Structure formats: C-alpha cells, structure tokens
Image: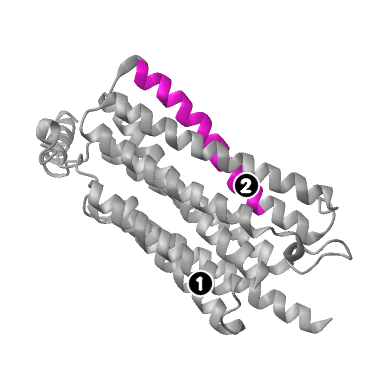
Amino acid sequence: MAQAAAKHGENHAHGHDHGHHDPQEMKILGFWFFLISDVILFSVLFATFIVLRDNSAGGPILSELIKMPGVIAETFILLTSSFTSGLAVLAMNQGKVKQLINWLIVTAVLGASFIALEVYEFIEMVHEGFSYTTSAASGAFFTLVGTHGLHVSLGLIWMIGLMFQLKKRGITDVTRGKINVISLYWHFLDVVWIFLLSIVYLMGVM
Amino acid sequence: MAEHNSHDSHGHEQHGSLKSYVIGFILSVVLTIIPLVVVLNDMMGKTGTLIVILGTAALQFVVQLFFFMHIRETEKPRWNVMALIFGLLIMMTIVIGSIWIMLNNAVAH
C-alpha cells in the first residue's frame, strides 16, 4: 500500500515533469469543449430552421421581411467587435491594464449596438405580423437568431463583470485566463453570426 | 513593441500579434463583402450564388479560427482540434441528415 502510494507519488511527479499542462491551458481547453457543444446546439437549430424556413402557414414570408441594411450593419459591428476583443488580448499580453479595459469597453459598446439593432429588427417583424407563434418558419427563425442574440447578451454581462474585476485586481494569472476565454467566446459568436448571415439572411433574400 | 518578454517564459502568452489580427480582420471584411455584392446585385444563378455564399462563409470560418482564435498555437496534442473535427462531423450529420430526410418527406405529401 505504502509502495503503491509511493509509486503513485512518483507517477505524479513524473506527470508534472513532462506534460506542462498549466491550469490556464487546461481551462482554455475546457472552454473549447464548451464551444464545441455549443456548435452542436446551433447545428440543431440551423437544421430546424433550414427544414422549416418555407412553412409560413399563410402568414408573412420571412424573405420579404428581411431588411438587408440593418443586417449588414449588424454584421460589420460584430466583426469589428471581434477584432477589438483581440486587441484587448494584445494589450493584456503587453501588461497594459488601462488599454485592455478600454478595448473591452469598445467591444462591449459594439456588442450592445448589435443587440439593439437585432431587437429593433425583431420588433419590426412582430409589427408586420411575423411573431414567434405565427408559423413554423417564424418560430424556427426567432429561436435560431434569438439564441445567438442571447449568447451575445450573456457575453456582454460577463464582459462588464470582468471589467470591474480588472479594475479591482489588475492583470493576474486568474484575470488573464478569464480574458483569454471571453475573447475566444466572442470570436466564436462572430463565427456563428457568419453562418446566420449566410444561411438565414443571404440565402433568404437571394 | 518588439519584445513583450516580461512574462513569456511559458510560451502561452504569445497568442497572436497585431499583424495576425489585422490580417484576419481585413480577410474577414473582404470575405463578407464578396457574398453581399453577389447576392444584392443578383450577379449569378442560384447554384453559383449558393456556392459563393457557402464558400466564403467556410473560408471566413477558417480565417477566424487561425487568425483570431489561434488554433495553431495551442499545446500538443491538440485536443481542441480533434474535438472541433468531431463537433463538425456531428454538425454535418445533423444538418445534412435533416435536410435529406425532410426533403424526402416534402416529396411524399
């Protein structure tokens, strides 16, 4: 037993020598696993939407309600915010807290404008008689696009919380890991939006 | 600017440079504008437009993966890449499988 314990200890030390899996690296890997489970969530919603997109049940048709100028604005706002969240990580790697917080503020403001535009778009659609329960197409549309919007909104709340933490504690190993993770999340949301733009909007109006 | 060596002894700090973010951003903007121009001006037939939309989306996905999410800079073995490939496999199965089955249903009624 003692031998086993000693052996175990040895293995443990051995493991430490070789695999330099520091906790931050493992946290980022864990977050990748979360993102991939989110990919599967979105793929189910995409499949549902693609299958149901033409089932308008005599109600308004989605492709006639899409207003491209708003969608194009949303696209470039989110793309830019993905870029600025990357700049925030760069500022962090150079140890500049102030610059880091400022880039996070820019990212959050862009994210909030994206959400505002999207909510405005939804309200207009509902005014035109295209609400959540109108048809299979409308239900699938709001669920898919709304789930993405919900992700962005949660990311915003998370980001604001991190700004306060950065103000209080500065750049430590813990906050550094958190910033790396949220920037990964933010890039991921931009990737999902590319597919929303392509499949929901561009294929809708073509 | 040249060196950020205050804490890069572990090598996990060097996630990207300004250059990689700027290149990624410019490529993403270009890859977004191409399908927009094609769709809004009705420049191609249905199949051509579909290929352009899906092709540029896939390319932009790759661009963001490499230039923004730094998938190449993770430690080996790259569990995240393997998990991602697995996730994409499930995604394709769900999406293509659903379309295939439901199109057959649509024919039936």
Give above or below for A17 relative to A36.
above
Numbered disc 2: what chain?
A
Is residue B85 at least partly visible in the picture?
A: no
Where's the N terminus of chain A, which quadrant?
Answer: top left
Picture quadrant of residue A10 = top left
> Where residue B88 appears, x then y in whole percent?
46, 64
Q: Is residue B54 magenta?
A: no
Mark 1, residue position: B54
* Side of B92 relative to A185 (left or right): right
Q: Residue at x 51, y 78 (%)?
A: B51
Are callouts 2 and 1 both on one chain?
A: no
Numbered disc 1: secondary structure: helix
State which mark lies toward you, 2 or 1.
1
Left or right: where does residue B34 sit relative to residue B64? right
Q: Looking at the picture, tell me which residue is in the foreground, A194 or B8.
A: A194
Q: Please give the name of the residue rendered at 63% of the width and 62% of the height, measured from the top-left corner.
A: A201
**Magenta includes A159?**
yes
Instruction: Identify the magenta region.
Output: A144-167
Viewer can see residue B54: yes
Residue situated in front as seen by the camera: A74 or A20: A74
Q: Position of residue A128 (x, y in %)?
A: 83, 52
Give me the C-alpha separation between circle 2 and circle 1.
Answer: 22 Å
Picture coordinates of residue B90, whole percent (x, y): 50, 64
